[in-house]
Image: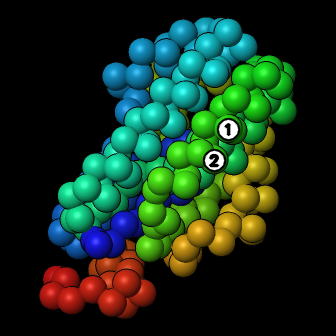
C-alpha cells in the first residue's frame, strides 16, 4: 500500500501550497479540499446555523471519497487537510458556538466515526503551526471575500481547538512546521530541508 501524508493547520496556514510543492518534489499524487465546488459554502458564510451541518457533511464526504480513491489506487498521496480536522476542529467549533444543534452534531459524529473504520490511517501528519496574526494576514492576502468577512474571534476559536487537538493526536507520526517563520512561497529555500526530513521519516528513496 502506498504512503499517505496529510496536512493540518488553521485556515490560511498554507496547506494547499505545501501540498502542491511537496507533491511535485516527492512525486506524490495531490488531493485538495473541495472548496470552490462546495454548494453550501457561500450560504454557510451568510447563515452558519442553517447551513453548518450541510457544509460539514459535504466536506466529510469529499474527504472520505479522496481517501477511498487513495486506498484503491495504491499510490503515494498527499491531502491538503486531514479528515480528523473535519470533526475535531470545524464541526466541534460550530457545535460549541451553537451553530450546529446537538442532534446534528451527534449524527455527524456517528457518520464520521463509522467512516474511520473503513479508512487507512495516514503515515505522516504535517502540522503547520501558525499564529492567528499570521493567519489573518494570509487570509487578507488571499483575498477571498467570504473569509475576510469572518470575525477574528472565529479564527481564535479554531486556533484553540487546534492546540488541544494536536496535543492528543495519535493516529500517525507528526512533523511540525513553524508557519510563522517558514513561508515556502516567500522563502522557497526552506523546502529542501522539509523534503529531506519527510523522506527520512517515511524512508522514501530517490527523492530529489
Q: Residue at x 73, y 59 (%)?
A: 165
Label 1 to label 2, Cα distance in Å? Answer: 5 Å
Q: Is residue 23 above or below residue 38?
A: below
Write down the quadrant of residue 179 in the picture: bottom right
Q: Look at the numbered discs 1 and 2 and tell me whether their residues touch, using CB distance below 8 Å.
A: yes
Q: Is residue 115 left or right of residue 113?
A: left
Q: Is residue 186 visible?
A: no
Q: Is residue 48 left or right of residue 126?
A: right
Residue placed under numbered mark 2 in the picture: 113
- Residue 74 lies, in percent from the top left, at 23, 65
- Residue 98 lies, in percent from the top left, at 83, 22
Q: Is residue 7 visible?
A: yes
Residue placed under numbered mark 1 in the picture: 110
Quarter of the image that includes the N terminus: bottom left
- Residue 46 lies, in percent from the top left, at 61, 9
For residue 43, the mark is none
The image's colouring method is rainbow
- Residue in front for this viewpoint, 75 or 157: 75
Amino acid at each position: 500500500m502506498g504512503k499517505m501524508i496529510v496536512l493540518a493547520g488553521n485556515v490560511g496556514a498554507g496547506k494547499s501550497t505545501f501540498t502542491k510543492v511537496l507533491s511535485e518534489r516527492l512525486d506524490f499524487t495531490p488531493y485538495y479540499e473541495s472548496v470552490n465546488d462546495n454548494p453550501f459554502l457561500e450560504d454557510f458564510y451568510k447563515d452558519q446555523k442553517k447551513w453548518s451541518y450541510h457544509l460539514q457533511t459535504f466536506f466529510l464526504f469529499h474527504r472520505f471519497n479522496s481517501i477511498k480513491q487513495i486506498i484503491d489506487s495504491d499510490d503515494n498521496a498527499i491531502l491538503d487537510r486531514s479528515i480528523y480536522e473535519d470533526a475535531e476542529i470545524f464541526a466541534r467549533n460550530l457545535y460549541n458556538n451553537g451553530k450546529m444543534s446537538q442532534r446534528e452534531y451527534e449524527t455527524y459524529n456517528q457518520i464520521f466515526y463509522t467512516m474511520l473504520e473503513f479508512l487507512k490511517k495516514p503515515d505522516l501528519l504535517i502540522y503547520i503551526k501558525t499564529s492567528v496574526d499570521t493567519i489573518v494576514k494570509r487570509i487578507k492576502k488571499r483575498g477571498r471575500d467570504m473569509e475576510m468577512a469572518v470575525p477574528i474571534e472565529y479564527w481564535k476559536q479554531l486556533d484553540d481547538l487546534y492546540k488541544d487537538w494536536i496535543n492528543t493526536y495519535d493516529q500517525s507520526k507528526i512533523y511540525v512546521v513553524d508557519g510563522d517563520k517558514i513561508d515556502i512561497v516567500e522563502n522557497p529555500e526552506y523546502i529542501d530541508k522539509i523534503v529531506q526530513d519527510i523522506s527520512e521519516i517515511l524512508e522514501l528513496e530517490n527523492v530529489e
